[in-house]
Image: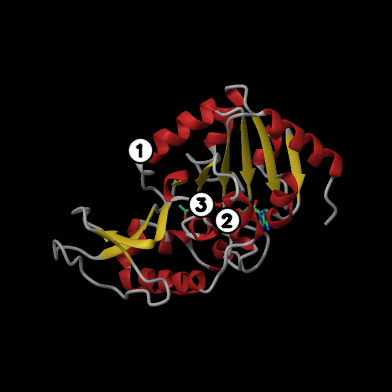
């Protein structure tokens, strides 16, 4: 894939002039680490192979908790052997940039981004929590993911991945912080997202409506391309190091 060097240079110039920027990322950021995206044309994309209403909704979990936990165990094992790619490593070299991410993986953390610098809008797959929301939550071992089990604290419900499923609310504090940040930044770098899942995708419009600039990095066009001041077409593992 040829990278448009003119667009890239202009985006670089913009970034150098901006004192306050942030990143908004999606599954494409982790694709070069071997983590499956959700809705690429690629036949391996998760929603091309699996039904999100069965596997990523609370009703699907209540219907067949064993099926959901087994699917997450497969994804967790896959993540346990993945490594941060050049895109994650590049972002870890930018300590001033907050990373707003839809990704539930921990590859930004493993690349060296501090926990405080990452806003996980859709939760974290390396944690479990009580489905009855008794408040109990714990980190799990990705390489030995737990099977279906009851909450050890309240013994009243199952444990489930601490991720946001379709139809569930985003973590309120993280969401509010993300909204505030996207209204304030001079530039939002949108990386590897189809920008189709709301409310997360709405963050891009918030920056645009506040007169912030938008740089989009993606292998394909997406609804975010229409909002972009600069569209950088190509893999994030190449484009992020080139941009910074
Ligand atoms: P998607 O799978 O919807 O989109 C991935 C995007 O990354 C696509 O636009 C691809 O073109 C792009 N892409 C793929 N490989 C890339 C690469 N190497 N470099 C740059 N871009 C690349 O993933 P998300 O937008 O993250 O939510 O999906 C949003 C949410 O939908 C997810 O958080 C998840 C999913 O259902 C829940 O499960 C609630």
- Give the secondary structure at mark 3: loop
Label 2 within 8 A of ligand 1 by Cβ: yes
- Is 9 left, or right, of 150 in this rendering? right
Q: Which mark is on residue 16?
A: none
Quadrant containing the C terminus is: top right
Does residue 172 sit above or below 108 in this rendering? Answer: above
Looking at the rendering, the quadrant in which ligand 1 lies is bottom right
The foreground one among 58 and 192 is 192
Q: Earlier in the sequence, mark 2 or mark 3?
A: 2
The foreground one among 4 and 118 is 118
Does residue 183 sit above or below 43 in this rendering? Answer: above
> Label 1: how many residues lie within 10 Å, few (<14), some (14-19) or many (20+)?
few
Camera-nearest label, 2 or 3:
3
* Residue at 38% in and 68% down: 68
- Give residue 200's position: percent from left, percent from top: 50, 41
Q: For marks 1 and 3, give the CA distance.
A: 20 Å
Q: Which residue is mark 2?
A: 27
Q: For marks 2 and 3, give the CA distance.
A: 17 Å
Q: Which mark is on residue 113?
A: 3
- Is 242 left, or right, of 31 in this rendering? right
Does residue 105 sit above or below 76 in this rendering? Answer: above
* Residue at 56% in and 29% down: 185
Q: Which residue is mark 1?
A: 173
- Give residue 146's position: percent from left, percent from top: 32, 74
Q: Earlier in the sequence, mark 2 or mark 1?
A: 2
- Give the secondary structure at mark 2: loop
- Give residue 233's position: percent from left, percent from top: 76, 48
């Amino acid at each position: 894939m040829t990278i448009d060097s003119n667009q890239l240079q202009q985006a670089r110039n913009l970034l150098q002039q901006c004192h306050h920027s942030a990143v908004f990322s999606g599954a494409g950021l982790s694709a070069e680490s071997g983590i499956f995206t959700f809705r690429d044309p690629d036949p391996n994309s998760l929603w091309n192979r699996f039904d999100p209403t069965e596997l990523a909704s609370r009703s699907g979990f209540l219907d067949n908790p064993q099926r959901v936990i087994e699917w997450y165990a497969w994804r967790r094992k896959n993540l346990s052997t993945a490594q941060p790619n050049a895109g994650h490593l590049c972002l870890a070299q930018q300590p001033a940039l907050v990373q707003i991410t839809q990704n539930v993986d921990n590859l930004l953390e493993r690349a060296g981004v501090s926990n405080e610098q990452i806003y996980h809008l859709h939760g974290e797959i390396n944690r479990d929590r009580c489905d009855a929301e008794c408040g109990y939550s714990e980190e799990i071992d990705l390489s030995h993911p737990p099977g279906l089990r009851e909450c050890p604290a309240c013994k009243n419900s199952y444990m489930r991945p601490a991720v946001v499923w379709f139809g569930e609310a985003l973590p309120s504090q993280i969401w509010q912080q993300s909204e505030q940040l996207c209204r304030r930044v001079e530039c939002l770098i949108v990386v590897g997202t189809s920008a189709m899942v709301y409310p997360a995708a709405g963050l891009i419009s918030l920056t645009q409506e506040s007169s912030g600039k938008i740089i989009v990095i993606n292998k394909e066009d997406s609804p975010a391309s229409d909002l972009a001041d600069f569209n950088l077409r190509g893999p994030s593992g190449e484009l992020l190091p080139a941009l910074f």
